[in-house]
Image (cartoon, rainbow, N blue to C red):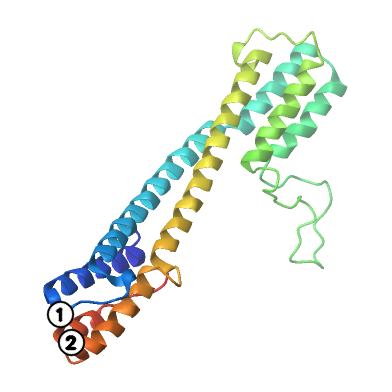
Amino acid sequence: METGHAKNVANFEQVIIILTALGTVYNPSQALILLSALQTKLTEAKAALDAVDAAEADKTIKVDEIQDEIEGLDKYVVNIKRTAEVELNDPAFTADLQSVVNKFASGSRKTGLPDDPSTPDINESRTKISTSQRSRDNQIAHLADILALLRTKSGYKPNDPEYTIAAIEAKLATLTAKNNAAKASEAALGNALDARDAVLYDPETGVLKLVKLIKTQLAVKPGKSSAAYQQINALEFRKY
């Protein structure tokens, strides 16, 4: 559990324990802070925290899976290009493939220009490092571009099964499926976080609002000097 949110829920449970110990002394007319309603809210809060934990775990697994699948894709496309270079022996086509392969490169490359000492913050001898082309979506799209190019060449029939059209199609399908699963898990986590925040921090019905109402009720009876009020007032509730 996340420490801050979990602490709010744990303290809310402590509030309910204190109120329960008051017996008939605690008898509010406000339905939101009846003991039965508070118990229901506590159940919802615990379930919301559990849902966030589960969603976070699922996201971690799904992102790991796509990262593992995409690991080494830059080397894979280089070998596809090399295979096509030998298989087709078409320099123009090889150049077309190379232009796509270059988009997988995260590091800088030599530009053939000398570094200008008058611009110490810029190295003109190398290209800028950019990761804009290396997002999961982009890398998958680049592989699809390579596949589309290869499909235009009927003579591309390599002996190595790893670089056949069918193998590349299977790789692309797996990458797409795992990438979409990761995206779905990220969306699910967002929904779980929203649901948790609604239970804990809704300005009208959230846990923090209820605790404020409870303290106001206890200030009337049994009063601010009572042990119940003092104990609850000492508990910390914060919006995270």
Residue at the spot 24% in from the left edge and 84% down from the top edge:
218
Q: In the rendered view, does 119 fall on the left or right side of 104? A: right
Of 95 and 63, the residue lying toward us: 63
Of the 4 image quadrants, the one containing the C terminus is bottom left
Of the 4 image quadrants, the one containing the N terminus is bottom left
Q: Which residue is mark 2?
A: 222
Picture quadrant of residue 157: top right
How many dots with numbers?
A: 2
Q: Could you say where residue 239 lies in the image, as x and y percent from the top left?
A: 41, 72
Q: Is residue 71 visible?
A: no
Residue at the spot 66% in from the left edge and 23% down from the top edge:
79
Q: Could you say where residue 96 lies in the image, as x and y percent from the top left?
A: 83, 28
Q: CA distance from mark 2 to mark 1?
A: 7 Å
Residue at the spot 56% in from the left edge and 42% down from the top edge:
183
Amino acid type at circle 2 is Pro
Where 67 sits versus 164, above or below? below
Q: Could you say where residue 111 lies in the image, as x and y percent from the top left?
A: 81, 47
- Nearer-N-terminus badge (2/1): 1
Q: Find residue 25 and name its label.
A: 1
Q: In the rendered view, does 136 fall on the left or right side of 203? A: right
Q: In the rendered view, does 56 fall on the left or right side of 130? A: left
